[in-house]
Amino acid sequence: MARQLRLKLERDRLASLDEFVRGASNRDAAAAVGSWPDWIGGCLTLVGPQGAGKSHLARAWAQAAQALVLQGPVVNLVLGTGRPVLLEDADRGILDEALFHLINGAVQEGGGLLLTARTRPSSWPSALPDLRSRLNALPVAEIAPPDDAVLEGVLRKFFRDRNIRPPPEIYPYLLARMNRSIPDAAEVVRRLDEAGDDGFRPITRVLAREVLEENQSLDF
């Protein structure tokens, strides 16, 4: 019964910028994102590998700035004018004309453009000379793969969001054995939660070992 009550209280919400877990791997990037609206040209590109926490940080900014969130290869050119915009995966197929429009619109009053990408904008292909020059000039904040401080912080948050209080030894045990990314941390916590509920078992190192061994060949 206690486990069922805890699940009913499960929270699913975005972290605010103040709550975003910081460490050596992301502190400078978080500071750069938090400096909006003082970005040069109204734009900032958040660059880092998959699983580093780009989307977590970008969505926290979007929530604080009440930004329009866009994703996908085609973006309506009318969208985003005169308001902050988050464009996710900006290096993965957006039309040149749409990206050019968004960058130009970022300097308007009340505007701003945060881009997330795995590569620097100077390396993105573009057939528009004017866009090429703008991409080369875009400010960049880099976020590295999460360090131990960040991973432990997000594990604690994900457990807290599910109203779980694991014993302290769970954290060093998981950090030494799990895949090192934010999505992996979320998936490990989810699987521990489900495994505990299925067998009415507490979250322990024994359960953690079983979950990690069961899923060691999976790409979360």
Image (spheres, helix red, strand yellow):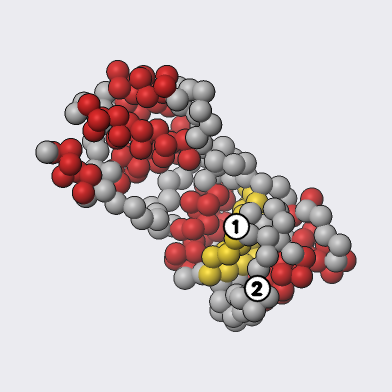
Residue 23 located left or right of residue 123: left
Three-letter residue code for mark 2: Asn
Identify which residue, 189 or 160, lies in the foreground: 189
> Quarter of the image holding residue 112?
bottom right
Residue at horizontal 51 percent and vertical 69 percent from the top: 67
Q: Position of residue 113 (x, y in %)?
A: 62, 67
Q: For mark 1, does the 10 Å Cα neighbourhood hold few (<14), some (14 to 19), or many (20 or more) residues?
A: many
SS of the residue at dot 1? strand
Residue at horizontal 53 percent and vertical 52 percent from the top: 55
Residue at horizontal 21 percent and vertical 50 percent from the top: 9
Identify which residue, 218 or 207, lies in the foreground: 218
Q: Is 143 rendered above or below residue 105?
A: above
- Name the residue beneath numbered marker 1: 88
Mark toward the viewer: 2 or 1 = 2
Residue at horizontal 43 percent and vertical 46 percent from the top: 21
> Quarter of the image holding residue 80?
bottom right
Residue 66 located left or right of residue 173: right
Alpha-carbon span between mark 2 and mark 1: 15 Å
| Residue furthest to the front | 198
Q: Position of residue 127 (x, y in %)?
A: 86, 62
Residue 28 located left or right of residue 213: right
SS of the residue at dot 2? loop
Q: Where, quadrant-wise, is the N terminus in this rendering?
A: top left
Q: Position of residue 145 (x, y in %)?
A: 56, 37
> Of callouts 2 and 1, which one flags the residue occurring earlier in the amino acid sequence?
2
> Quarter of the image holding residue 3?
top left
Three-letter residue code for mark 1: Glu
- Name the residue beneath numbered marker 2: 76
Q: For mark 2, does the 10 Å Cα neighbourhood hold few (<14), some (14 to 19), or many (20 or more) residues?
A: few
Q: Is residue 41 visible?
A: no
